Amino acid sequence: MPQNSDLSETRTTPEVTATPDNGRESPWERIRRGLRPGQRQMADWQGGSLAVSAVPGAGKSKGMADAAALTIARSQLNHRRQLVVVTFTRSAAANIKVRIRQALETLGLPAYGFNVNTLHGLALNIATQHPEQSGLSLEEATLIAPNQSHRAIAHCVERWIAEHPYRYQQLIEGQSFDGEETERLRRQSVLRTDVLPALAHTVIHESKSSGLLPEDLLALAEASQTRVPDDDYEILAIAVGLYREYQQFLRSRQLIDYDDMILAALRVLREPSTCQIWQERVYAVFEDEAQDSSPLQSQLLELLATDANNRDAPPNLIRVGDPNQAINSTFTPADPIYFRRFCQHCESRGLLATMDRAGRSSPMIIEAANFTLDWVNEHYPRALQGLGTAIVEEALPFRAQHIHPVDPGDPQKGANPAPTGLGLELCAPRDIYATVGAIARRIVELFSHTSEPRSAAILVRENRQGRLIQEIFSNPKAYGLDCELLDRGIPVYDVAANERLSHVPGEILALLNFIDRPHSPQYLKEALRVLVKRQRIQAQDLDRLASRPEQFLYPGPLAPTQSPSELDARGFCTRLLDARIALPIYQLISFIAVELDYNPSELATADKLGERVSRQTARSRSMASILEVLNEIVASESFEGVDADRDTESIYTRSGQVTIVTMHKAKGLDWDYVFIPFLHENTIPGQSWVPPQAQFLGEFTLSEVARAQIRASLHGQKQFYSRRLGDFDPTTAIPSVRESWQQAAALKMAEEYRLLYVAMTRARRLLWMSAAVQAPFTWSKPENLQQQKPCPVFAALAKHFPESVVTVD
Ligand SMILES: Nc1ncnc2c1ncn2[C@@H]1O[C@H](COP(=O)(O)OP(=O)(O)OP(=O)(O)O)[C@@H](O)[C@H]1O
């Protein structure tokens, strides 16, 4: 058990366990009695490691906050010795801080002895307090969060191409190549702007977040050369080159990324003297949303939670999470396998608490969620055929953990509320437009039959679906619908539309880059992408256009005739280039904003951006300085971030309102009525596919194969959850390209099903789900309807709960 050392300030211990003599219940007991069994296990924790595997709505934050307050009281924590609570987002951190304060107040204690942080906030704190050990000084370094089109990635791709002409040529030749010049240019464009940036982005993040240096990746690449016979391109060797170039670029520009911050904090903790200071300062660590942590982050927490005076003892660490709500594993290295293994490890020592009671939803909704989990786990192994039983078991989409309604006498008021309507309603409208009409009618019905405050949300898989719903709601007559949602004064809050403002600087930068260097295939393609996204030009083969900028923009008399959509795109691009000559440089931003058909708030954002750029470039107003400032704005992020003070949760879940939000963003929230439309097989679970323009490389994508190979190799390490991580063994099994692609497909499928599960478990009183008979093949062309198969789980639910199937017009 952790020891208290050097307490210069002491707290008055509340009545910790006993009932006071007067027979009245102590505040301590009151808090403890108000907890559910799994929450109580957390509250009674007195040291060592504990895994808490919770179901949706089980009360993870409530349990953690109360357990934190009781621990602070019991161990008399103070400013010098603290409990560190780690959450995934800033808003969750703010939320839990308030709850801990409230619980301490109930105990009659002042609000200190704890520190709530996000993982990155914590790492930054550690790293900047010891700049010599961490090698990190924020005064000199700039923090970046590179995405695939970030200049750091573009730079490393260009450098790699220059340094590796032979490998690059091999990629251009792909599976077969007849040497035709236009095709060569097209392939170059695809490699430069899509394939290699995606590979770089995936591999760098995956490796860095797992503590793998370029040398480690090189060892893996060398091992794979002898073991993976179908790897013609030696994908991991390419990845090593990209990773090295990226690191070099960051060093030369004094840039750091988020993984560097964790690594910097780890450097501090690897230094015995500073490690001692931190370990003495930290009494224990409580981690929320543990399923979303990367291996390196877990390593940091374990080190921090280790008792300075007894380093061989298990770390004083509670990790709370729900492996079934892991929905970041295909775009971050946070694979749910790590938290599951931690749970197994603790379970074998009797140190696993399970929070499987949840009061959020009506029993019918709980039944539907449990059914989904079982159905998917049962049918999913087919997707993993040929991968070996051990992998299949660990890679099942869900931990076999059912949600149970709360016990009688549960402290949560109104737990497991009575259902509204059927509780679960499933329907198959004739098409997507009829779907939106049916949702609108049902919402009007639901809101007009109650005077109670009720909230509703429509959860979509992607923003384009949300945009269409909003469009139909605003103008139902144009779609032949009679929908009175807005007439009734029911407000609709479209989360994506309100967040679109954050895209403004990036879009403007893309167009300015093109105006500055129109002959760069990369900048031309980025600009065309923005124009397609903003629906200013039609979707078309952008690589073909971008591979010969000169010919596309200024075709000579012998050039092939351009199609109407190409002509349109060209017209747009040349207009932008003319503006460069016709307008003063400082007016270009406003000009672009108008050309992109921004709405009033986007225009205002662009104006504000223009002002800032103009202020920062007052001394030398050249295109180069404008681009530099804009790049800085787009690329750098500060911790005191944009949304820090906005209580988005309460905006999203306001009663009387309908919120349109993606399933990803809905995580952690709940509504009385939840609508999940457009459940088709081609979106959930969808399919792994290779974009047609990249098929010359083969029937797989390089980035997904590399990710699967790195992960398989990491997962082979049995001690993965442990502090002894670091002895990376590249000789563990590396799957072939074919197997890796299959594993990538399985990972995606599992994640899609977990996403659906997260969406379903947001509902309190009514869960309405639908799969229209006619739906688009792709949501970039929603008007192209065709018969679509429902998502297999939807079909299974309809079969299993026939009484929930309703018909709509
Ligand atoms: N012991 C309890 N007493 C009273 N209310 C509780 C208790 N435990 C949980 N609740 C309530 O249950 C609801 C769900 O809790 P919470 O949001 O913490 O769940 P969660 O586990 O984080 O859910 P999810 O993982 O689905 O986001 C909250 O309204 C919370 O106040």
Image (tube, grey):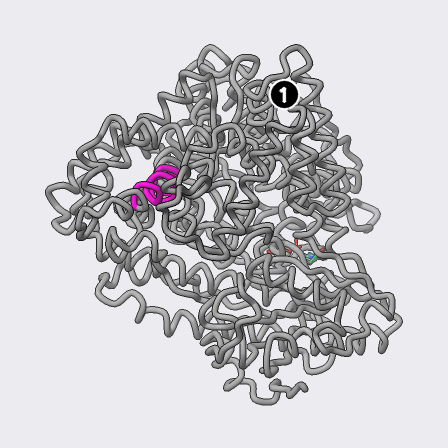
Q: Position of residue 767 (x, y in %)?
A: 65, 73
> Residue at 64% across / 87% down in the picture?
806
Q: Quick check: is 197 in the magenta stretch?
A: yes
Q: Quadrant of the C terminus?
A: bottom right
Q: Position of residue 130 (x, y in %)?
A: 51, 14
Which image quadrant for residue 699? bottom left
Instruction: Say if 759 sits above or below 20 in the image.
Output: below
Q: Which residue is mark 1?
A: 80
Magenta stretch in the rendered image: 187-201
User: Does mark 1 have its CB less than 8 Å from ligand 1?
Assistant: no
Viewer-proximal residue, 58 or 699? 699
Horizontal side of residue 359 vs 335, given as left or right:
right
Q: Position of residue 768 (x, y in %)?
A: 64, 75
Classified by dominant secondary structure, the portion drawn in magenta counts as: helix
> Residue at 42% across / 22% down in the picture?
250
Viewer-proximal residue, 672 or 65? 672
Q: Quick check: is 622 in the magenta stretch?
A: no
Horizontal side of residue 492 vs 687, given as left or right:
right
The quadrant where ligand 1 appears is: bottom right
Identify the secondary structure beneath mark 1. Answer: loop
Which image quadrant for residue 761? bottom right
> Residue at 48% across / 70% down in the picture?
777
> Residue at 33% across / 26% down in the picture?
245
Q: Is residue 69 visible?
A: no
Viewer-proximal residue, 475 or 220? 475
**Residue pushed farthest right?**
451
Q: Is residue 483 visible?
A: yes
Indicate the amino acid at tag 1: Arg
- Circle 1: is it few (<14), some (14-19), or many (20+) Cα within 10 Å? some
Viewer-proximal residue, 599 or 773? 599
Instruction: Say if 783 sits above or below 718 in the image.
Output: below
Horizontal side of residue 349 vs 318, given as left or right:
left
